[in-house]
Amino acid sequence: MARRALPILKKLSDPTHPLPGLGPTRSVTYMPRPGDGAPRPVTLIPGDGIGPVVTNAVEQVMQAMHAPVYFERYDVHGDMKSVPAEVLDSVRKNKVCLKGGLRTPVGGGVSSLNVQLRKELDLYASLGLPTRHENVDIVVVRENTEGEYSGLEHEVVPGVVESLKVYIS
């Protein structure tokens, strides 16, 4: 997919290539470019499974767009016992993180690194991006501390894990 998208992005980002209705200061992003254009650090956690494939594609797109970002890569995997302190420090410093999926351990009372990250960074809500469609004003907000996302689970008997749902009203 990235191979097909890169030529299209390059064509769109070429200011000498005219597109109807777009001025010379157009952007291939849907959001205005903030700041002074200085490269910004982004913490990158490729993760497990398909995570590295997805985050690698994002890196390629950012590079093709000449986005003013650079990635601080940290190898964190779902089978680790905890998130390293330097990763948490990087996310706190950069205030932005691109994270691929992390494997969730089953049983043994081990907390998922996804849950650990949410708790350590006090991530109360997950905000979806506003829609790019005109006349549609929707933003999805998912609360991260209730239900399955609370991370309250235990092994009742070997091989049987019970997950608790917590709702606060």
Image (spheres, helix red, strand yellow):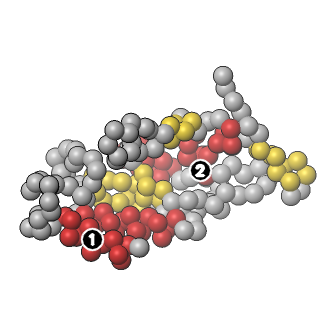
The residue labelled by disc 2 is 114
The residue labelled by disc 1 is 8
* Location of residue 12 in the rendering, given as x and y in whole percent from the top left corner: 21, 65
Question: Is label 2 in contact with label 1 (beta carbons under 8 Å)?
Answer: no
Residue that protrudes farthest toward the top in the picture: 169
Residue appearing at x 24%, y 58% in the figure: 28
* Residue 92 sits above or below residue 1 on the image: above
* Residue 119 sits above or below residue 109 on the image: above
Residue that protrudes farthest toward the right in the picture: 157
Q: Residues within 10 Å of mark 1 (few under 14, many from 20)?
A: few
* Location of residue 65 in the rendering, given as x and y in whole percent from the top left corner: 25, 63
Q: Quadrant of the N terminus?
A: bottom left
Q: CA distance from mark 2 to mark 1?
A: 34 Å
Q: In this orientation, does residue 10 appear? A: yes
Numbered disc 1: secondary structure: helix
> In the picture, residue 147 is in which quadrant?
top right
Q: Is residue 90 left or right of residue 157?
A: left
The amino acid at mark 1 is Ile
Q: In this orientation, does residue 122 appear? A: no
